[in-house]
Image: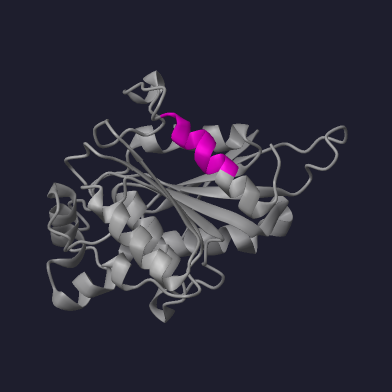
Amino acid sequence: MRCFRMPVLENSPAVLTAYLHDRFPEMSGRDIRPAMLVLPGGGYHFCSAREAEPIALDWFGRGYDAFVLNYTVISESIPAPLYLKPLCDAAAAMSLIRKNAADWQIDPHRIAAVGFSAGGHLCASLAVHWDDDRLSAPDARPDAVILSYPVVSPRAAAGTGDIYVAEKLTANEPEWLEYFAIEEQVRADMPPAFLWTTFEDATVCPRHSLRLALAMQETGIPCELHMYDHGPHGLSLAAAETGFADAQIATWTELSARWLNRLFGWEE
């Protein structure tokens, strides 16, 4: 494995960590690989370690080159509201991966993103706003997204997560509330999505995922949705390593991998 870190933008604290497979002559057919960009959660206040490297290594083990983005979050030097700062980081990261695809032996047409909670909101935002000129990031569209218990709208009024995101990301300004209400921004060229959540999530109500899935279905965008009947917010891999083990919920990793592999025509 080759592992290294790099900045994604000037004047941004965001850092991209890469986990690349070594290429060996005896492993023919694996010279060019798909890639996964990981966007951890943390309420735009921090980037959760439980939703970062463990997720990247899981996808790495499935044959994907993986990247973790520690994007801009609220701090003493970067107060709320954040507006476009995290999205600029995510778009720049996706653009950077594509720009270096040949050198890193990545298929530029098989680059997905996975996000968790607020990172799921960031991932969904990238899926619908990838070509916003203000992001200044060419080729930033992910080829697919996986949204794990995501905040979808900062004005859903269906749990504490959306209220928090509304305050920290948009300052409740109408223009930005609309911009970041992803179910209202679904478009015909949005990438396919895999969503999963839990019925018992009291932080980010599962209605977020339901609303986005419905909007995608109405627009004709391929979407797969799973709602587990139990489990709290912030499950990550649903494994002991990440703080909450549940064998049933842990199936999301295999289910999402099967979905993405079928979409990408990739075999583990």
Q: For residue 254: magenta? A: yes
Q: Quadrant of residue 125?
A: bottom left
Residue 207 highlighted magenta (yes or no) = no
Residue found at the very far bottom of the displayed protein: 133
Could you tell me residue 4's position as x and y percent? 56, 41
Q: 261 or 28: which is nearer to us? A: 261
Residue at 27% from the left image edge and 30% from the top image edge: 231
- Start-end of magenta stretch: 250-258
- Name above or below for residue 15 compared with residue 133: above
Q: Quadrant of the N terminus?
A: top right
Report the predominant secondary structure element of the magenta stretch: helix
Q: Residue at x 13, y 60 (%)?
A: 167
User: x and y percent of residue 237 in the render?
Assistant: 41, 31
The percent coordinates of residue 160 (x first, y second) are 13, 48
Q: Is residue 11 visible?
A: no
Q: On the rendered structure, is 112 left or right of 262?
A: left
Question: How many marks on residues?
Answer: 0
**Res. 224 in view:** yes
